[in-house]
Amino acid sequence: MNPKHAARRKATVHLLCGLPGSGKTTWARRLAAECSAVVLNHDERMIARHGPNPPESEFTRFAAAVTEELWREAAGEIAHGRDVILDWGFWTRAERDDARRRGGEIGAACVFYRMRCADDVARRRTLERTAAGTRTAFEINGAAWDLFRAKFEEPTADEGAVEIE
């Protein structure tokens, strides 16, 4: 077959869904190595700009700006045929639906992963990270983690998530 006519594989946006401490970033790094993808980590970008404990009153505004910036970067990578991993969390159905829509708009295939981790393990990991003073993760105490858990909307079967333990 003439290479000029060979079907080109569509670049993929990999969407990682899970709570803090569920293993999203570890999985993102592993997946990136396997498929030569670019990892775009929302928390790391936020922390680089606003520190590990940004003011609650500004958090939503800061997060929205970072989200838009990362989508622009993702679009550029996809346009060049490179896979992108969005290591963001996607806690609500609305966020997940929006990400799939945006992925399609930039011409990407979308694969959605649900990070499965027992709540007590994810919570412990998160608290240990905070206690260790890790500057690559938000400072999250037990009350905050519990609040995040309460806000998290479990993906439903129709979302087609690939389950990662």
Image (cartoon, rainbow, N blue to C red):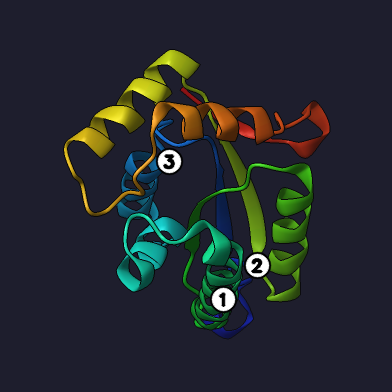
Q: Amino acid at mark 3?
A: Lys
Rounded to the nearest angstrom, the CA distance separating label 1 from label 3 is 21 Å
The correct choice, above or below, for 92 with respect to 72 in the image is: above
Rounded to the nearest angstrom, the CA distance separating label 3 from label 2 is 21 Å
User: Which residue is the site of mark 2?
Assistant: 108
User: Which residue is the site of mark 3?
Assistant: 24
Q: As rendered, which of 9 and 51 lies closer to the eye?
A: 51
* Badge 2 element: loop
The numbered disc on residue 52 is none
Rounded to the nearest angstrom, the CA distance separating label 1 from label 2 is 22 Å
Residue at x-position 36% and y-position 49% = 138
User: Which residue is the site of mark 1?
Assistant: 65
> Label 1 neighbourhood size at 10 Å, few (<14), some (14-19), many (20+)?
few
Q: As rendered, which of 60 and 24 lies closer to the eye?
A: 60
- The furthest residue to the left: 132
Instruction: Count all numbered tags in the image, as a single digit.
Output: 3
The correct choice, above or below, for 60 with respect to 120 in the image is: below
On-image quarter of the N terminus: bottom right
Q: Amino acid at mark 1?
A: Ala
* Badge 1 element: helix
For marks 3 and 2 on the same chain, the one whose residue lies earlier in the sequence: 3
Residue at x-position 43% and y-position 40% = 24
Residue 45: quadrant of the picture: bottom left
Residue 118 in view, yes or no: no
Q: Amino acid at mark 2?
A: Ala
> Residue 47 location in percent, x, y?
34, 62
